[in-house]
Amino acid sequence: MITKKIKQLALTTVAGMVLSAGSAMAAEFNFTFAHVLAEDTSNARAAVKFKEEVEKNSDGRIEINIRPAAQLGGDVEIIEQTQMGLVHIAIPPTGNLANFEPKMFLFDLPFFMTDDETMMRVLDGEVGQELLDTLDRHNMKGINYWGAGFRKMTNNIRPITGPDDLKNIKMRTLQAPTIMSTYRAYGANPTAMAFTEVYNGLQQGVVEGQENPLANIYTMKFHEVQKYLTNTNHTYHTYAAVMNKAAWDSLPEDLQQVMLDAFEVGRDFAREATIEDEVRFIDEIKDQIEIIDLTDEGLEQFVEKSQPIYKEFESQVTPELLQKALDVAAGN
């Protein structure tokens, strides 16, 4: 469904690539890169690094115009705009992409990717590429995966030490069926809400808790309006770097390689910056919010309560892909 905002954008934005005019040194390709993230997050900084790499290594033939902080709408709107060619580059969460490509449900299965080594085996290998390739039929070119680290749970009701502690808590989630089903399995009341509305939602009690990686919790100041944070690390907050298919196909081979190289630089920058930032974030918020680590028993309870989610989404992911992914995650 095309939103009103997208219709308005369609009237004011030239779809596809713009041949710049007015200067002998103008870029051949002008691409819009949209995302919802605050500009000081690791992935927003990675987007700037990507822009610098592209413009430098293309000798100015490609110009990247970054539109951060949900200037062009939420993640779902940005995905729709990318499909239409109103946006050319995006890094939406795979949880939102799953509304368009069901196999993407895989990445939000709880306790599937449990550490950075597992994450890289899955995302950067054959399984990750297979899922990126599915985006071709949705008018997008999947390039690689960025990410903001593992998600934590925060709330105002009680410390979360196991799934039973989530009972009846109103949890804000992405507009993602896998995530909403997960919280229902834990006994919570999940509510989908745009990322930019979460702070006010928590402050006003519309929702009582939320899940996000530390980068988003810190930069959006959720710790100011929450009492408890649990290091559940239940899913890796994966962003898929994507391009509008026509925009990608319009590039000559040499510039496609420039883009691929820059996407890799952006991915690596985002991951390294995330690890560095998390140490600082914990130190800065530890006196403002109670931080809880799961015990082995609490983790085991979460893993057990999560098993029905795998069954629920097995048919969409496909049994073959799910088993292959589980094998890769296990190092087999």
Image (tube, rainbow, N blue to C red):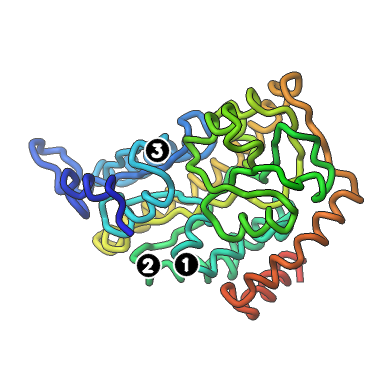
Q: Position of residue 125 (x, y in %)?
A: 60, 65
Q: CA distance from mark 1 to mark 3?
A: 22 Å
Q: Which residue is mark 1?
A: 101
Q: Residue 260, image x and y in percent? A: 42, 55
Element assignment for label 3:
loop
Kindly identify the residue that appears in the image at 10 percent across and 36 percent down: 23
**Residue on which the image places disc 2:** 138
Locate residue 211: give its quadrant.
Answer: top right
Residue 32 higher or lower than 82, as above or below = above
Residue 231 vs 320, above or below: the answer is above
Q: Quadrant of the N terminus?
A: bottom left
- Contact (Cβ within 8 Å) of mark 2 with mark 3: no
Q: Which comes before the other along the chain, label 1 or label 2? A: 1
Q: Residue at x 76, y 38 (%)?
A: 230
- Amino acid type indicated by mark 1: Glu
Disc 3 marks which residue?
Answer: 70
Q: Residue 104 vs residue 208: left or right?
A: left
Cα separation, mark 1 vs mark 2, equals 8 Å
Q: Label 1 neighbourhood size at 10 Å, few (<14), some (14-19), many (20+)?
A: some
Work out whether residue 323 can be spotted.
Answer: yes
Furthest residue toward top: 287
Residue reaching furthest left? 22
Name the residue type under label 3.
Answer: Ala
x then y, percent, for residue 199: 55, 30
Residue sitting at x 49%, y 55%: 96
SS at circle 1: loop
Decide: few, some or many residues near mark 3? Use Cα within 10 Å; few <14, some 14-19, many ≥20.
some
Q: Do residues under tags 1 and 2 come within 8 Å of each other at their CB atoms?
A: yes
Viewer-closest of 241 and 125: 241
The picture quadrant where one finds residue 208 is: top right
Q: Is residue 118 visible?
A: no
